Image: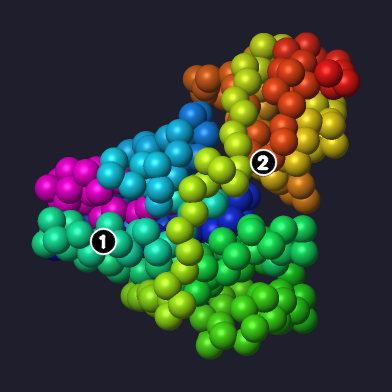
Amino acid sequence: MTTIDLVSGFLGAGKTTFIKRYAAWLRSVGKRPVVVENEFGLLNIDSALLRDDGTDVAELSGGCICCGLKRDFRNLLLVLARSGVHIVVEPSGIFNPRDFFEVAADPDVAACVEIGSVLTVVDPAVIPDLDETSRTILREQMNSAGRILVSRTGGLDEQDRRAASEAVAAFLDGSAEGRIDTRSWDELTGGDFAELSLAGYRRSTDGGRYWDHATLYDAVVVKAAAEFDAAEVADAVAATFRDVGDVIRLKGYAPRRGGGFHEVNCTRRDRGIHETGGNHRAFVVAIGRAMNRARLERLFSQAGQPADQT
């Protein structure tokens, strides 16, 4: 049987960062991980981050594997199951785990694939910013998890980690039942990853809800046509969250003046911008609601230009 692990989490929680470490551990114990990378937008940025680390990736973009790409996901699992790999699924941040379990229970899939662990990555700092729909989606992800991994705990002292754990527990109304893990991922040993791989999963007793995510969120992809220095790309990112609309997530690659790229991996609270080399497509994708494509295009087509008011 082929094992499949699911690593869920809302937009920008840190799923890809964790999966890079988890995939490295799987390789170190002789397994061949393949990450099924699902991107709600048409441009899959996280795949490049994983491939840079030597991880094999199978992409499903332009929708969610829990709704619009559900059949494609089923068929991909059947293909991978014949390849002798360990499957790790990174769904989009607005993923509904109910449909993952339905696909796994498909008779053809269940005959060759078994669920290992379901892990949910959560950044408690963003929970207060979520609207009720986003909170419901995150809560359903967390309720299905065998372990809830709190992200961005590196450098926190014991008191701050306890506060983070308490915030997550309060969000789930006390139903976390010892599943919250606040350890820094940099501290995890091989034994720790082995333990996480055996964390299992839970089936929600309320049945969850069906979502058509295309009606809840939008993804806007634009070409990054200009070259930017560090200050200019930071200004473009700040203006995106301020002026383009209700932007939840922004990621992509913007050309760097002098060569290379700026890797943009940002949420409302976390502005992750890093210089990188490699051969990347110069695009950015914004995920959110009521976004103005013209303003986003203007910001990334000419460095130093503010968004207009069209």
Q: Is residue 304 magenta?
A: no
Residue at 28% x, 57% y is 103
Whether residue 237 is visible: no
Q: Which residue is mark 1?
A: 104
* Image position, residue 91 (x, y; %): 45, 50
Left or right: 32 in relation to 151: left
Depth check, front residue: 175 or 86: 175
Q: How many marks?
A: 2
Residue at 77% x, 35% y is 245
Q: Amino acid at mark 2?
A: Gly
Depth check, front residue: 28 or 254: 254
The magenta span reads 73-90
Does residue 253 lie above or below 209 as drawn?
A: above
Q: CA distance from mark 1 to mark 2?
A: 29 Å
Depth check, front residue: 27 or 239: 239
The quadrant holding residue 234 is top right
Whether residue 26 is visible: yes
CA neighbours of label 2 inside 10 A, class few (<14), some (14 to 19), many (20+): some
Q: Secondary structure at mark 1?
A: helix
Does residue 223 lie above or below 128 as drawn?
A: above
Q: Is residue 84 magenta?
A: yes
* Image position, residue 130 (x, y; %): 72, 58
Residue at 60% x, 65% y is 136
Q: Amino acid at mark 1?
A: Ala
Q: Which residue is mark 2?
A: 288
* Image position, residue 226 (x, y; %): 71, 12
